[in-house]
Image (spheres, coloured by chain):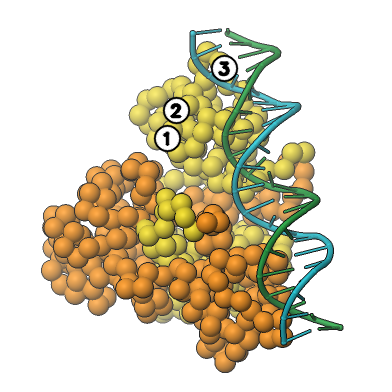
Chain colours: A orange, B yellow, C cyan, D green
Amino acid sequence: MTKISVNTVERLILYRKILKSLISEGITNIYSHRLAHLAENSPAQVRRDLMVVGYIGSPAHGYNTKVLEDSISGFLDVQDGQRVAIIGLGKLGRAVQDYCKQRNSRINIIASFDVDPQKVNRMINGCFCYNISELDKIVSELKIEVAIMTVPVVEEAQIIAEKLVANGVKALLNYTPAQLKLNPNIYIENRDMMMALEKAAFFAKNFNVKNL
Amino acid sequence: MTKISVNTVERLILYRKILKSLISEGITNIYSHRLAHLAENSPAQVRRDLMVVGYIGSPAHGYNTKVLEDSISGFLDVQDGQRVAIIGLGKLGRAVQDYCKQRNSRINIIASFDVDPQKVNRMINGCFCYNISELDKIVSELKIEVAIMTVPVVEEAQIIAEKLVANGVKALLNYTPAQLKLNPNIYIENRDMMMALEKAAFFAKNFNVKNL
DNA sequence: ATCTGTGAACTCGTTCACAGCT
DNA sequence: AGCTGTGAACGAGTTCACAGAT
C-alpha cells in the first residue's frame, strides 16, 4: 500500500484536535481551506493527508466534522484501546498525567512507577503507583504497550527502557535527556526539554532570516 | 547563503548534547561514523550537517570533540546570551525549570510568572516569580526573548502569547494544548503532551509496518 | 588505507492544476 | 462557481560516490 509519512501522522493528530474543538463549538462542516488555515498549512496538504483515512468529502459541504474526526480516529487509534504506564512520578510525571487525562479515551494510563515510599502502593492522580522493583512483573501482567519515561536520573533511563521493551513495550515517549539505544523496531519519541528550548532560542534569532 | 533546514538545527542540537557527554568521558576525537551511530543517522548526514558550522575535520583524526562542540555552539548560540521566562509555575513549569537548569549557560531562565499568591513575589527554584499582572512590564524591562508557556488554562494561552509578543518575545515553547495564532515571524515550538502520546501510541502499533 | 567535504543523483514530501462532482 | 481527489511537476532533504587530504 502507499507509505504514510511521520509528518502526515503528526498532522492527522493535529487535525483531530482541531476538529474536536470545532465540534464542541457546534460547527458541523468544514472545508479543506479552513482546516488548513487552523492547522497553518495548505488546503492541498490537508486533502492529501486525508486521503489515507478513507473518508470522501463532498464538494458541496466539505467534510462533516464529526465523521471526519471518527475517520481519523479509526485510522490512528487501536480499536480496543492501548495501555500506557508512566515511569517516574516527579513533578513532570504528574504533570504529564494531568495533561493526558480525559482527552483520548482509547489511550489509557493505567499504571505508574516510582521509588519514593511516600508514593508507592497508593493511588496517585487516579492511577496506581507501583514500586519500580515490580516493573517487569506489572508491565507484562498489564500488557503495557507504551511507556512515558519521566525519571530524573539519566543513567537509569537506559536500563529501565530495556526492561520495558523486554516486557512487551513497543513505543516510548522519552522526556529524559538520555539518548536511548534499543532494538530498532521499538519506536522512540524523544522530548528532551532542554533541546526544545535550545531550538526555540535558535529560531528566536534566526527565524525568517534568509541569509545563512 | 545556503538555506539551513529545521532538521539540521535539531540534529546539531543533538550532536552537541552527545559531544558534551563524550567530552565528560574524556573522549577527545570522533569520526562522523561514530557520531552518526550515536545520533542514529548516517555518516553522510553528519558531515552534511556539520558543513554549516564551518569547522573542518581532519581525515586523520576526524573531529576534535571540544572544538566541534564550540563550533556548533558558535553557530547555535547567541554570543551575549538569551533571556527566557516561564509562564505558569504549576508542576510542569517547575519541572521544565529543573530540566533546563545548568545545561546551557547561554540560555538563562531569568523570570517566571504565576497567579497563585503563594508563589508570587518569591524566589522559586532559583528564579523570581512575578505576578502575571506584571507580565507586560517585566517582559519588556528584562528584554525577554523566549517564553515557555506552561499555563493550565488553554483559553488564556492565546491572550498571554499576544502580550508576550507585544513586549518583544520572538519565540515560544508552547506546552499548552492551545493552537496559538500569532504574527508569522514569531517562532512557535508546540509540545502538546497528549499529541506526543498519541503519536507514540500510533507507532507502537504501526512502526515498521510496511503495508499501509 | 581511511578519513573528510561536496557536486550530483536520488528519494520523498509538498504543491500544482485540473477532471469530476454537486 | 466552487469544492474535492489525485496524477504529475516540483522542490527540499538525504544519500551516493569520489576527489582531495593526511
Q: Chain of mark 1?
A: B
Q: Are marks 2 and 1 on the same chain?
A: yes
Q: Secondary structure at mark 1?
A: helix
Q: Amino acid at mark 2?
A: Arg
Q: Position of residue A150 (x, y in %)?
A: 32, 57
**Crowd tier of the residue under label 3, counting other residues whose Cα lies within 10 Å: few below 14, some 14–19, many 20 or above:** few
The residue identified by callout 2 is B34
| Lateral position of residue A21 relative to residue A63, left or right | left
Per the image, label 3 sits on a secondary structure element best described as loop
Task: Report in which chain the residue with disc 2 lies.
Answer: B
Query: Disc 3 vs disc 2: which is toward the camera?
Result: 2
Q: Nearer the viewer, residue D19 or A173?
A: D19
Q: Residue at x 23, y 67 (%)?
A: A111
Residue at image x 42%, y 50%? B208
Residue designated by label 1: B38
User: Disc 3: which chain?
Assistant: B
User: In the rendered structure, which amino acid carries the disc numbered 3?
Assistant: Ser
User: Can you say whether A182 is above or below A11 in the image?
Assistant: above
Q: Name the residue carrying label 3.
A: B58
